[in-house]
Amino acid sequence: MGGRDTQAILFDLDGTLIDSAPDLGAAADQMRVARGLSSLPLERYRPMAGAGARGMLGVAFGITPDAPEFVTLREEFFLNYEARMLRNTQVFSGVAELVEALCERGLRWGVVTNKSVRFTDPLTRAIALFDTAGAIISGDTTPYSKPHPEPLFEAARRLGVAPEACVYVGDDERDILAGRAAGMRTIAATYGYMGEQAEVARWDADAAIASPLELLQLLNQP
C-alpha cells in the first residue's frame, strides 16, 4: 500500500475525517419537534449520517427522495443544518495526528465529499485541520458526485498527481466504488457511520482500517 508510488491520500469528509452526525441529526430532529413529534435519540440518526439529507429525513419522517414533499423538507433541513453545523461537529480522534504524519512524510492530501460546497466551504474554513489540504472537492464542484470517479479525478488534478498514485479513504460503499473507478487504491474506514452494519468485505476495498492512525501502518507496507 505504501512505497514511493503513493503520492497523495484523499479522504471522504463526513464519517471519515469529521463526526458531523450530532449536528446533522439535530437539524432533522428539530423538524420533528417543530411538528409536534417526539424527539429521537442521536443513535437513531448516526448510522445514516453519511447519507446526508436523504438519510436524516428518512430517519426523521420515514420518507424517500421520491416523496412529493421531499424537496421542501430538504431545504428546511439544509437551513437548520446551516445554522448549527459547527456546534457539535468534531474531528475524529486520531485524524489530526494522521494528517500531521502524512505531511511530515511529504504526502499531499485532500478531501472528496458529496456534501455541497454550501456546507463544505464554511466547515473546512472553520476547522484548522484543513489548512494543509491541497484540494477540497464537494459534491457539486464537478457535474458529478460519487460514486462517479470525476470528483476524484479533479482532486488528483488539483494535487498535481496521477490518480493511480492516490489512495482514497472512505466510510461508504460509494467511496470505494468511486475510488476503484478512478484507478485509485481504496481503504474502507470502518470506524465511520456505516461500518458496523455494512458488509464492508463486499465493497472490495484494498484494505480496511478500524481507526484513523491504522492508515499509517498500511502506508508502511510495501
Image (cartoon, rainbow, N blue to C red):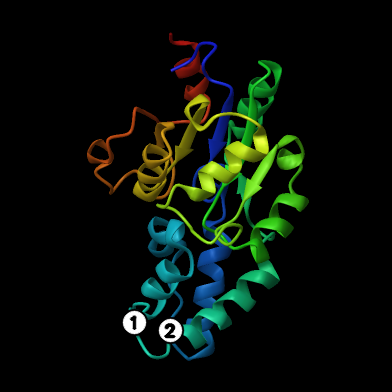
Q: Residues within 10 Å of mark 1 (few under 14, many from 20)?
A: few
Q: Dot 1 lies on which element?
A: loop
In the rendered image, residue 168, in percent from the top left (x then y), is placed at: 48, 35
Residue depicted at x 58% and y 62% = 140
Considering every residue shown, the one lying at the far top of the view is 222
Q: Is residue 190 visible in this depiction of the protein?
A: no
Residue depicted at x 48% and y 84% = 71
Q: Nearer the viewer, residue 21 or 219?
A: 219
Residue depicted at x 34% and y 47% = 173
In the rendered image, residue 165, in percent from the top left (x then y), is placed at: 52, 25
Q: Is residue 54 left or right of residue 213?
A: left
Q: Is residue 57 left or right of residue 200?
A: right
In the rendered image, residue 172, in percent from the top left (x then y), is placed at: 39, 48
Identify residue type, mark 1. Asp
- Circle 2 sits on which residue? 70
Which quadrant of the figure has residue 135? Answer: top right
197 relative to 221, above or below: below
Identify residue type, mark 2. Phe
Mark 1 touches mark 2? (CB < 8 Å): yes
Q: Dot 2 lies on which element?
A: helix
Looking at the rendered structure, which numbered label has been put on residue 210? Answer: none
Q: Residues within 10 Å of mark 2 (few under 14, many from 20)?
A: some
Residue depicted at x 71% and y 41% = 130
Q: Is residue 133 left or right of residue 142?
A: right
In the rendered image, residue 102, in percent from the top left (x then y), is placed at: 63, 22
Which quadrant of the figure has residue 43? Answer: bottom left
174 relative to 76, above or below: above
- Circle 1 sits on which residue? 66
163 relative to 62, above or below: above
